[in-house]
Image (cartoon, coloured by chain):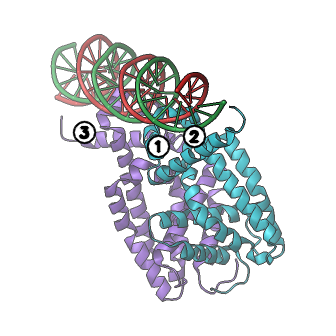
Chain colours: A purple, B cyan, C green, D red
Amino acid sequence: MEKEQMPAKQAKLNAILDAATSLLVEKPTASLNEIAARAGIGIATLHRYVESREQLMLHLGFRAMDVLREAFESVEKEAYAAERYIPRLIETLIPLGDRIYFLARDATVDNNPDMEHTYRDIRQPVLEKIELLQQQRILRQDCDAEWVWSVTESVLFLAWERMAGGHLTASSAAALVESTVRRGFGVGERQS
Amino acid sequence: MEKEQMPAKQAKLNAILDAATSLLVEKPTASLNEIAARAGIGIATLHRYVESREQLMLHLGFRAMDVLREAFESVEKEAYAAERYIPRLIETLIPLGDRIYFLARDATVDNNPDMEHTYRDIRQPVLEKIELLQQQRILRQDCDAEWVWSVTESVLFLAWERMAGGHLTASSAAALVESTVRRGFGVGERQS
DNA sequence: CAGAGATGATAGATTGATCTATCAAAAATA
DNA sequence: TATTTTTGATAGATCAATCTATCATCTCTG
């Protein structure tokens, strides 16, 4: 009666976060009432699981950070050929867009210092890898790693938006982003 | 007493819109009270010039559309060599960022059907020019003009953000965006 | 089945923002 | 100077959203 119900609570919280995600993707300004309705629970219950809208958004934000961290680490471990690193990153991230991209436009999330700090930590290994690829002349060296990665993110966001709007499928999106970035930053490639 | 005061009204409205722009760049959620304060007028006077927050945002939006239209047309008229078209567009747009980019994230503006329609009209000639450049093999042909232009916009937004954050100067931003886009979409170029 | 805990509906307190109304003071204009 | 217009301050109406409190009902679990 106090022992193994933590997981049950956690599961329900996750269900709520999933519902919030699915609604906020469609309508970023959705109220807590609408989110509760989408989750199939009452507003009172929502507040029993989440203290405030700000906390809810931060939960979503940190969950997204976990997804990203996992994606980065899994690609890092793959040990493909060095020039496959960014393409693999893109392929891995494309299907995760719907859990992430709507957050990047949310003021609560992207003005939060903790989130900012967490994201800096998460992306640090990616930047280092990019710098390494630059030293190996696989990526161009005349712009800093931060620019390379920021542009890649921007193009991913764009692809996610177009996927959400039905203008692009997941597989063609990955190919498009990959070729755009490879040509934008790769060294000595011909067009694909 | 009714004749030539239209221009005076217009001038004051413009001053208000300028003040709103300068504040909203810093703080996109600024209230009307804060905007009035920034403009150095009372809230009542603000409402005499602008009916509602929504109308204010739309004024800003349409003003930004005018700026864009003018930029596109001026580059169109320049009659440079064809491959200079996109670089010229980028150079022209970079200094205009602070009057435009904060709007792209505003829900009122970018969910408005009129704005959407207006922007489609404005950017149509750009898309056509890009298609032409693709036929001339100056730009790669394996992705549609809309993708090319959307990516260019995204990279411009990114540069604007970094300029606002002091991470980039206007001139280096233009060069960075230009080389990124040229390499991303140009045909048969070496790295610069 | 009995009791503990969780839930949903509802009512309402609180807050922050938008917008209106009013009026005396200031500014422009004749 | 007299008059008309514009302005700023203030007060307050309205509204939407967040969050709290309560309570009857439902659902587990023992």
Secondary element under disc 1, as helix, strand or loop, is helix
Q: Residue at x 42, y 61 (%)?
A: A68
In-front residue for pair A46/B136: B136
Residue B68 image point, x, y percent: 68, 57
Please report, as a chain letter, where disc 2 is located: B
Q: Residue at x 64, y 67 (%)?
A: A175
Residue A116 image point, x, y percent: 36, 60
Secondary element under disc 3, as helix, strand or loop, is loop
Front tag of 3 and 1: 1
Q: Check disc 3 and give the amino acid type.
A: Gln
Residue A90 image point, x, y percent: 54, 67
Q: In 3D space, how far apart are the residues under numbered discs 2 and 3 (Cα atoms)?
A: 51 Å
Circle 1 crowding by C-alpha within 10 Å: few under 14, some 14–19, many from 20: many
Residue A34 is labelled as none
Q: Where does label 3 land, which residue? A: A5
Q: Check disc 2 and give the amino acid type.
A: Leu
Q: Residue at x 77, y 61 (%)?
A: B73
Residue C20 vs D17, above or below: the answer is: above
Q: Where does label 2 land, which residue? A: B56
Q: In 3D space, how far apart are the residues under numbered discs 1 and 2 (Cα atoms)?
A: 11 Å
Q: Where does label 1 land, which residue? A: B35
Q: Quadrant of the N terminus of chain A?
A: top left
Please report, as a chain letter, where disc 3 is located: A
In-front residue for pair B5/A100: B5
